[in-house]
């Protein structure tokens, strides 16, 4: 695991301050990233292409259970962290236990916040906060039929009877 990429929110606040002073464009995104797949990789690569530094907020196991139900995540937090740190397009990763990204967005104040292409601006719960902190919302391309839910369904269908 690339421990240099894993930071706390306090550490990121300091790092981001330095990077902004250097004129770097800070990009954030967040998610569960359960069963890492090509849709995640393409999404994160696109997110990185919008700026200089990509910071990924990873939902903790606790917050995933609140959002997706008691049977999730399938892959534990430490392993999801390890997979994300292995990707070249990801500069920093941190875990957060809230069900929304509001707290970390208020701290990091990115230039750009990326959401998946399956969102519309109206469905982005942090939209008002992004306007308040003067961050641009970027909706990534929708990567059709590439999701953890579809992978799980295919596994279950493949192993019936």
Image (cartoon, helix red, strand yellow):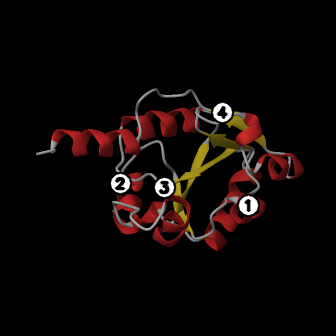
Residue position for label 1: 102
Q: Mark 1 vs mark 4: which is more N-terminal? A: 1
The answer to the question of whether label 4 and label 3 lie on touching residues, with beta carbons closer than 8 A, is no
The answer to the question of whether label 1 and label 3 lie on touching residues, with beta carbons closer than 8 A, is no
Relative vertical location of residue 53 with respect to residue 18 in this rendering, above or below = above
Q: Mark 3 vs mark 2: which is more N-terminal? A: 3
Q: Nearer the viewer, residue 102 or 70?
A: 70
Residue position for label 2: 83
Q: Residue at x 50, y 63 (%)?
A: 64
Q: Report how far apart the C-alphas of labels 2 and 1 lie in the structure.
A: 24 Å
Q: Residue at x 63, y 65 (%)?
A: 12
Q: Mark 4 vs mark 3: which is more N-terminal? A: 3
Which dot marks residue 139? 4
Q: Secondary structure at mark 1?
A: helix
Residue position for label 3: 32
Q: Mark 2 vs mark 1: which is more N-terminal? A: 2
Q: Is residue 135 visible?
A: yes
Q: Report how far apart the C-alphas of labels 4 and 2 lie in the structure.
A: 23 Å
Q: Residues within 10 Å of mark 2 (few under 14, many from 20)?
A: some
């Amino acid at each position: 695991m690339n421990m240099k990429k894993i930071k706390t929110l306090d550490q990121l606040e300091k790092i981001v301050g330095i990077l902004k002073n250097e004129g770097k464009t800070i990009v954030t995104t967040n998610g569960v990233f359960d069963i890492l797949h090509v849709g995640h990789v393409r999404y994160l690569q696109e997110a990185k292409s919008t700026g200089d530094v990509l910071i990924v907020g990873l939902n903790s196991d606790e917050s995933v259970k609140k959002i997706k139900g008691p049977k999730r995540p399938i892959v534990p937090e430490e392993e999801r962290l390890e997979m994300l740190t292995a990707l070249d397009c990801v500069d920093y990763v941190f875990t957060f236990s809230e069900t929304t990204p509001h707290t970390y967005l208020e701290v990091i104040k990115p230039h750009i916040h990326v959401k998946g292409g399956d969102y519309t601006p109206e469905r982005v719960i942090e939209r008002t906060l992004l306007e308040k902190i003067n961050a641009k919302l970027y909706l990534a391309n929708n990567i059709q039929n590439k999701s953890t839910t579809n992978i799980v369904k295919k596994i279950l269908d493949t192993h019936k009877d």
